[in-house]
Image (cartoon, rainbow, N blue to C red):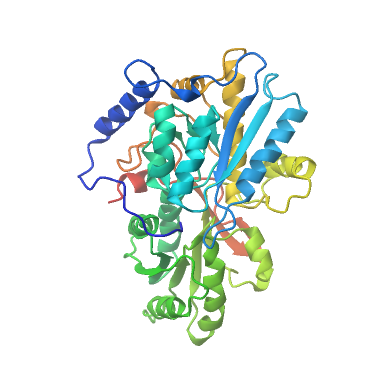
C-alpha cells in the first residue's frame, strides 16, 4: 500500500462486461501457451525427471516504505523443509529471491531475472509495481502464484493465481465491520496510485452496512510523523456528538508511525475507535507497542486468514522453528509470511498433481487452469482457478477468494471477532 506515485497503467475506458474481460484474459493465456505466433517461451522447460524445480520469490527490503523481508526468507525456509524430506516427488526445490526495493525498475529487473533463470513460477511475493513485473512474466508464460494482492494488476493478469482477496477484500471487509459499530469514519492512506483505490473499497463495505462514506485523507507513505493527519482524523471522527467515530490508518509499515502520533493526540478528544487491516498491523506490532496497553487495544482488524493463534498455523510454526535457523525476519504472525506459506502449499500441490510428468511453467498453468483444487488446512477456503470459480467482480476478474476474517485486539491479543470466514463477493461485485 506504499510507494511513490506512478502513472496508472489501467486504461481509463469503461469496464467491459465480465464475460468479455475474462474471454480476453483466456485468449492471452492461450497465446502464452504456444510458441508459434506468440514467441518462444523461456520458462517452458524447468523440471522433468529428477531435475530441480526452480522458482523465485521477491519482496521489498531495506526501503523507506513498506518492507516484507519475511517473505523471501520464508520461501528459503520452506525449500529447506521440503528438501529435507526428499523434495517434491523426488525433485529438489530451488528458491531464488530478489529485492524489488519498492521500485518499478527493480521490480521489472526481478521479473527479467526470473525469465533468464528459467523459473517455472514466481511464488508468494510482494510488489506494488504489478504492471512492471507482470509484463515480462506474461511474455515468458511464467505463472505468478499467491502474490500479496496489493495491486489490481494481480487480479487482472491471466497468469496471476491469487490465494487471497488482496487489499480489495480487506478494505471492503473492514468497511462492513466498522459500518455496524462506528460513527464517522476517517481513512488515512498513502498518497499513491495504489492508495487511491482504498477509499472506494472501504466505502463499498461501509455502504453495504448502511453507513455513509469515510473521510479520505492522503499522507506520504514514508513520513516520519503524522501529527497533522492524526489531528484532522480525530476531528472528523468526533464530529458526531452521539456516536463514537473510528480512525482507519492504512499505511502499511508506516501505520505504527501514525499510531505514535495518534496515541498522544487522542487524549484531547472524546473516545475514538481504530480500524485497520492485517498487513498494517499484526500481533508482533501489538506486542512491540505495549500489548494490552497498546494504542491498538480494542481495534477492529480485518484479515484474510484465521488469527495467528489458530491451530492451522502450527505446521508453519514448526517449519520456522526447525528450518529458519533463528532468522528474525520470519514472523509467523506476519500476513506476508502467511501468504508465502499458502502460496508454496499451492505450488507443492500442483507439483504433486503432475506426478512424474514434466514440471514447467506451462504444465503448472495448465494444472491450475484445469481446475486443480487446493486445500490449506482451513487457512483459506478450497482454492481453484477455473473460469467458473472466479468471482463476478468486473474490476478483479482473477479474484477467486474474497473471504475475510473479522478480528479484534482484546487484552493485547488478536482474536476472532466473528467465527469463520465472511465473504466479500457481493460487496466487491457491487463496488463502483
Task: Tell me: residue 117, above or below residue 299.
Answer: above
Residue drawn at x 59%, y 57% as measured from the top left: 62
Residue drawn at x 57%, y 31% as measured from the top left: 346
Residue 337 at x, y percent in the picture: 62, 47
Residue 316 at x, y percent in the picture: 69, 41
Residue drawn at x 20%, y 44% as measured from the top left: 14
Q: Is residue 293 left or right of residue 18?
A: right
| Residue at the farthest left position | 14
Residue drawn at x 66%, y 74% as measured from the top left: 293
Which of 384/148 is in front? 148
Which of 133/186 is in front? 133
Residue 73 at x, y percent in the picture: 66, 45
Is residue 233 at least partly visible in the picture?
yes
Kindly indicate the quadrant of the structure image that contains residue 220: bottom left
Q: Is residue 336 left or right of residue 26?
A: right
Residue 5 at x, y percent in the picture: 37, 59
Is residue 164 at least partly visible in the picture?
no
Which of 314/207 is in front? 314
Kindly indicate the quadrant of the structure image that contains residue 389: top left
Number of labels in the image equals 0
Which of 301/339 is in front? 339
Amino acid at each position: 500500500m506504499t510507494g511513490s506515485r506512478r502513472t496508472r497503467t489501467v486504461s481509463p475506458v469503461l469496464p467491459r462486461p465480465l464475460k468479455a474481460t475474462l474471454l480476453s484474459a483466456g485468449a492471452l493465456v492461450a497465446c502464452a501457451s504456444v510458441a508459434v505466433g506468440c514467441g518462444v517461451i523461456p520458462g517452458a522447460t524447468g523440471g522433468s525427471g529428477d531435475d530441480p524445480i526452480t522458482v523465485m520469490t521477491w519482496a521489498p527490503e531495506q526501503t523507506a516504505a513498506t518492507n516484507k523481508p519475511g517473505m523471501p526468507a520464508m520461501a528459503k525456509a520452506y525449500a529447506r523443509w521440503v528438501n529435507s524430506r526428499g523434495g517434491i516427488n523426488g525433485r529438489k526445490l530451488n528458491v531464488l529471491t530478489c529485492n524489488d526495493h519498492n521500485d518499478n525498475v527493480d521490480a521489472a529487473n526481478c521479473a527479467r531475472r526470473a525469465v533468464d533463470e528459467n523459473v517455472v513460477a514466481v511464488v508468494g511475493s510482494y510488489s506494488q509495481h504489478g504492471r512492471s513485473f507482470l509484463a515480462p512474466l506474461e511474455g515468458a508464460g511464467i505463472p505468478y502464484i499467491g502474490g500479496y494482492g496489493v495491486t489490481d494488476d494481480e487480479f487482472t493478469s491471466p497468469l496471476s493465481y491469487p490465494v487471497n482477496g488482496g487489499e480489495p477484500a480487506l478494505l471492503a471487509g473492514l468497511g462492513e465491520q466498522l459500518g455496524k459499530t462506528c460513527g464517522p469514519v476517517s481513512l488515512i492512506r498513502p498518497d499513491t496510485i495504489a492508495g487511491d483505490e482504498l477509499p472506494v473499497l472501504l466505502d463499498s463495505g461501509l455502504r453495504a452496512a448502511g453507513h455513509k462514506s469515510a473521510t479520505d485523507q492522503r499522507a506520504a507513505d514514508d513520513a516520519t510523523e503524522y501529527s497533522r493527519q492524526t489531528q484532522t482524523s480525530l476531528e472528523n471522527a468526533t464530529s458526531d456528538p452521539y456516536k463514537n467515530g473510528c480512525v482507519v490508518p492504512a499505511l502499511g509499515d508506516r501505520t505504527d508511525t501514525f499510531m505514535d502520533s495518534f496515541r498522544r493526540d487522542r487524549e484531547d478528544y472524546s473516545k475514538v475507535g481504530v480500524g485497520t487491516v492485517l498487513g498494517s498491523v499484526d500481533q508482533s506490532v501489538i506486542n512491540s507497542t505495549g500489548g494490552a496497553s497498546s494504542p491498538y487495544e480494542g481495534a477492529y482488524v480485518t484479515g484474510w486468514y484465521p488469527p495467528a493463534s489458530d491451530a492451522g498455523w502450527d505446521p508453519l510454526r514448526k517449519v520456522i522453528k526447525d528450518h529458519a535457523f533463528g532468522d528474525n525476519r520470519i514472523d509467523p504472525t506476519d500476513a506476508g509470511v502467511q501468504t508465502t506459506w499458502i502460496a508454496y502449499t499451492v505450488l507443492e500441490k500442483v507439483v504433486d498433481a503432475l506426478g512424474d510428468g514434466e514440471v514447467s511453467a506451462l504444465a503448472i498453468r495448465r494444472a491450475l487452469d484445469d481446475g486443480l483444487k487446493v486445500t490449506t488446512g482451513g487457512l483459506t477456503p478450497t482454492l481453484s482457478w477455473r473460469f467458473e470459480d472466479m468471482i463476478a467482480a468486473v474490476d478483479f476478474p482473477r479474484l477467486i477468494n474474497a473471504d475475510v476474517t473479522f478480528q479484534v485486539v482484546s487484552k493485547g491479543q488478536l482474536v476472532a471477532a466473528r467465527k469463520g470466514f465472511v465473504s466479500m463477493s457481493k460487496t466487491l461485485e457491487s463496488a463502483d
